[in-house]
Amino acid sequence: MLNEIIAGIAIRLNATFGDSYEIHQNNVKQGLKEPCFFIAVIKPEVTPMIGQRFIKVNPFDIQYFPENQGDNQELFTIADKLIETMDFITLQNGDQLHGTGVSYEVVDGVLHFFINYNLPMVRVTDPTYMETLEANFGTRESD
């Protein structure tokens, strides 16, 4: 499911910024062509709920490497556009996810845009039925 969310983020980024921005999911050792995005998964976790329900918390760091190093104006413009457009993403199966916990910061000339896409889930289990039970019913005689 995590890969489907990453694909949904990449689709939304491509729809917003176009083909002139490369979008990476895996580490790029050499030849990073800027401007580009890098989608990083931070630390997913599972929070149990009542019964068979649970929530998968999926935090992401969408990093933006600007075309011009040191151009904070470009970084803040991209951050504003990400806030507007990453609110909802559509997965390949048509489901929509709402982004929460949105924040951003600039570190060493790179924009880090943080957003969570959480999934409420239900564990599907086979029910355990009782064995067969035989009972004799009747009335008691009174004295």
Image (cartoon, grey):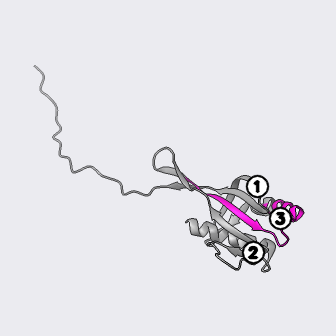
* Callout 2: SS: helix
Q: Residue at x 17, y 46 (%)?
A: 134
| Quadrant housing residue 116 | bottom right
Report the residue marked by disc 2: 14
Instruction: Give the image location of residue 33, x and y in percent.
Output: 75, 78
| Quadrant housing residue 135 | top left
In the picture, the quarter occupied by the N terminus is: bottom right
Task: Nearest to the eye among marks 1 and 2: give it.
Answer: 1
Residue type at tag 2: Asn
- Relative to 41, say whether 34 is above or below: below
Which span is picked out in magenta? 56-82
Report the residue marked by disc 1: 104
Residue type at tag 3: Ile
The first of marks 2 and 3 along the sequence is 2
Report the residue marked by disc 3: 78
The answer to whether marks 2 and 3 mark residues whose Cβ atoms lie closer than 8 Å is: no
Q: Residue furthest left?
A: 143
* Callout 1: SS: strand
Instruction: Give the image location of residue 111, x and y in percent.
Output: 77, 61
Q: Residues within 10 Å of mark 1 (few under 14, many from 20)?
A: some
Task: Report how far apart the C-alphas of labels 1 and 2 lie in the structure.
Answer: 20 Å
Residue type at tag 1: Tyr
Instruction: Give the image location of residue 128, x and y in percent.
Output: 31, 52
Query: In this image, 15 relative to 68: left or right?
Result: left
The first of marks 1 and 2 along the sequence is 2
Q: Residues within 10 Å of mark 2 (few under 14, many from 20)?
A: some
Task: Report how far apart the C-alphas of labels 2 and 3 lie in the structure.
Answer: 13 Å
Task: Report how far apart the C-alphas of labels 1 and 3 lie in the structure.
Answer: 11 Å
Q: Residue at x 15, y 40 (%)?
A: 136
Query: In this image, 133 relative to 59: left or right?
Result: left
